[in-house]
Amino acid sequence: MAIQHTVPATNLHEKSVQQKLNAMGLHTSIITPTVGDVVAGDVLFVPTEIKNAVASPGGYAILSSILMTDKSGGDFGYDLYFFSSNVGPAANGGTDEWSQVLNNPFENNNEDTLFHLDNFLAVAGLAGGVAYGNDSRVFQLTGLTIPVKAAPGSTSIWVGCEARDNSAQSDGDMKFRFTFLQD
């Protein structure tokens, strides 16, 4: 005997893309990760929580923009890695795997340790920052359409970072603003 599932009907197919987007709200989250001096290819910061990235526990959102300010002023490149939860086996303390490689070469580590693919969402690169103020830079990615999903029971996602270049930051030098389209 086959089991039949009844799915409630929606009228989303009757709405235009613009109507769907108009029904969504924008949410921004700001984080200031713990960073340090690194050389190219090192982990700059371990996965850090982006609270309320999605509107409902275990839900989805669209990452639409990333803005980063960097007081250190160098025109460095960065790769941001997004996860649906605090990566790593719970038995090993979540981000412990990333913590062990903080300020150490990223590429020398077992990717199974750093990326639990059932938690991995996306990667985004930042480069070519614009100088502003005294020795500071701003980096921006707009027009993104990256789907993200929080873990069951959570509204947060997580972001970690690898430095592409030698980089000399101090804690508080870097701030990120992530903008999400939420339904």
Image (spheres, rainbow, N blue to C red):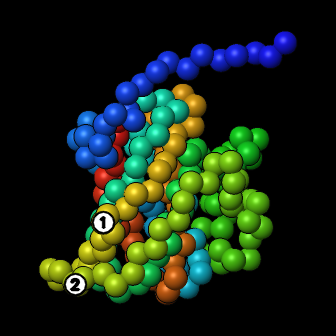
Q: Amino acid at mark 2?
A: Ala
Q: Going by the image, does 76 lie left or right of 97? A: left
- Residue 86: percent from left, percent from top: 59, 46
Foreground pick, 144 / 153: 144
Marks 2, 1: nearer the viewer: 1
Assess disc 1: are there few (<14), some (14-19) or many (≥20) residues with their C-alpha within 10 Å of its C-alpha: few
Residue 142, label in figure: 1
Vertical relation: 163 (above or below) 117: below
- Residue 123: percent from left, percent from top: 53, 65
Q: Going by the image, does 67 lie left or right of 160? A: left
Q: Label 2 to label 1, Cα distance in Å?
A: 18 Å
Dot 2 falls on a residue whose secondary structure is strand
Residue marked by disc 2: 131
Q: Furthest-top residue in view? A: 1
Q: Earlier in the sequence, mark 2 or mark 1?
A: 2
- Residue 169: percent from left, percent from top: 40, 76
Q: Residue at x 55, y 20 (%)?
A: 7
Q: Furthest-front residue in view? A: 14
Q: Amino acid at mark 1?
A: Thr
Assess disc 2: are there few (<14), some (14-19) or many (≥20) residues with their C-alpha within 10 Å of its C-alpha: some
